[in-house]
Image (cartoon, helix red, strand yellow):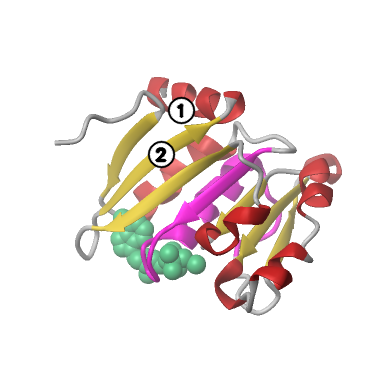
Amino acid sequence: MPVLPATAHRATTHSPEETRALGARLGVLLEPGDVVCLQGDLGAGKTTFVQGLAHGWGALDAVSSPTFIIVNVYRGALGARLFHLDTYRLGSAPEAEELDIDAMLAQGPLIVEWPERMQNVLPPERLWITIEHIDEMQRAFAFEASGARANQFLERIRNA
Ligand code: ADP
Ligand code: MG
């Protein structure tokens, strides 16, 4: 068994509701500039996690898969913004470079599905979540933090 790095954390959920609850615990903590990456196969539960996360953050808009327009923007109270990026349909690395990540981060937190497709344009400080499909209802979440903010999230999630 590999030893888990100190920055890692694991959780298992047994329903979409549990996944949303886990997402909501993280969502309440998010602030502009924060980056959360969600890696996992189709149907792993990335968008389900984002639903909970957006709810916890305080989104007034419903979450949907930003499959065709690449980025969804959800409104919060007092003009807050939450950015939800899905790179699944992103054609190429140059296309990813056209996204103004810095402009998004100046305005709100950024959540990324399929982050492995645009690693080179994502900031190095981020929370990276890998979701694994265990069986029909069970999903394993592995959290790995890079940077002070992401480590704070792990501590808060651990203590929750
Ligand atoms: P992705 O965005 O990774 O492609 P989705 O969140 O869109 O995945 O879909 C996940 C699917 O798996 C949904 O149909 C959801 O109802 C189902 N599901 C079953 N169990 C879970 C669970 N524990 N967590 C998240 N989704 C689950
Ligand atoms: Mg999705």
Determine the secondary structure under disc 1: helix
As displayed, is residue 67 above or below residue 37? below
Residue under circle 1? 154
Q: Quadrant of the N terminus?
A: top left
Viewer-side residue, 89 vs 66: 89
Instruction: Residue 64: give x, y in percent of width and height.
Output: 59, 68
* Image coordinates for residue 63, horizontal then vertical, percent: 60, 62
Tag 2 residue: 143
| 1 displayed left or right of 36 | left
Residue drawn at x 72%, y 70% as measured from the top left? 94
> What's the magenta region?
34-63
Residue positioned most to the left: 1
Q: Where is residue 150 in the image (x, y as percent from the top left)?
A: 55, 31
Disc 2 marks a residue whose amino acid type is Phe
- Between the residue at mark 2 and the residue at mark 1, the CA separation in whole angstroms equals 8 Å
In the picture provided, is 82 more to the left or to the right than 128?
A: right
Determine contact: label 2, label 1, CB under 8 Å.
yes
Indicate the secondary structure of the residue bearing disc 2: strand
Left or right of 149 on screen, residue 48: left
Answer few, some or many: residues within 10 Å of disc 1's Cα (few below 14, many 20 plus, some between 14 and 19). Answer: many
The quadrant in which the C terminus is found is top left
Give 78 or 146, whichever is nearer the viewer.
Answer: 146
- Please say if 11 is above or below 102: above
